[in-house]
Amino acid sequence: MPAKAKTVLIWLVVIFVIFAIYNSPDRASEVVSAIWDVIVNAVAAFGEFLGGLLN
C-alpha cells in the first residue's frame, strides 16, 4: 500500500473514531470496556495455558 494512501486511511479511521465518541459517548465506553474484557480474558487464558504446560 502506498504511503500516502496509508496515511489517508489512518486519518479517516481517527476521524471516524472521534465522530463516534462525540455522537455516542456511552456506546463508545461500552465498546472500549468490551474490548478490554476480551484482552484481559485472552491474557488470563494464555497464562493458564502456560501454567498448565509448566506443571
Image: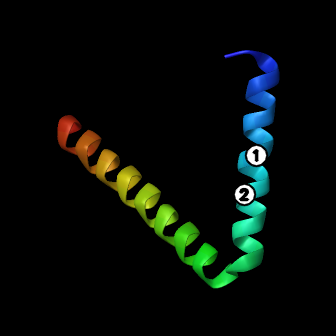
Indicate the quadrant where residue 41 lies. Answer: bottom left
Return the mark for residue 52.
none
**In this picture, residue 20 sits left or right of residue 32:** right
Q: What kind of element bears circle 2?
A: helix
Decide: is 5 above or below 10: above
- Residue 51 in percent (x, y) is at 26, 44
Viewer-proximal residue among 47 and 21: 21
Task: Identify the residue position indicated by label 2 in the image.
Answer: 16
Indicate the quadrant where residue 6 lies. Answer: top right
Mark 2 Cα shell of 10 Å, populated few (<14), some (14-19), many (≥20): few
Residue plotted at (18% across, 43% down):
52
- Residue 2 in percent (x, y) is at 74, 15
- Whether residues under marks 2 and 1 lie with C-beta atoms below 8 angstroms apart, the answer is yes
Task: Identify the residue position indicated by label 1 in the image.
Answer: 12
Residue plotted at (44% across, 66% down):
37
Q: What kind of element bears circle 1?
A: helix
Residue plotted at (71% across, 48% down):
13
Residue plotted at (69% across, 68% down):
20
Indicate the quadrant where residue 18 lies. Answer: bottom right
Quarter of the image for the N terminus: give it. top right
- Residue 53 in percent (x, y) is at 19, 36
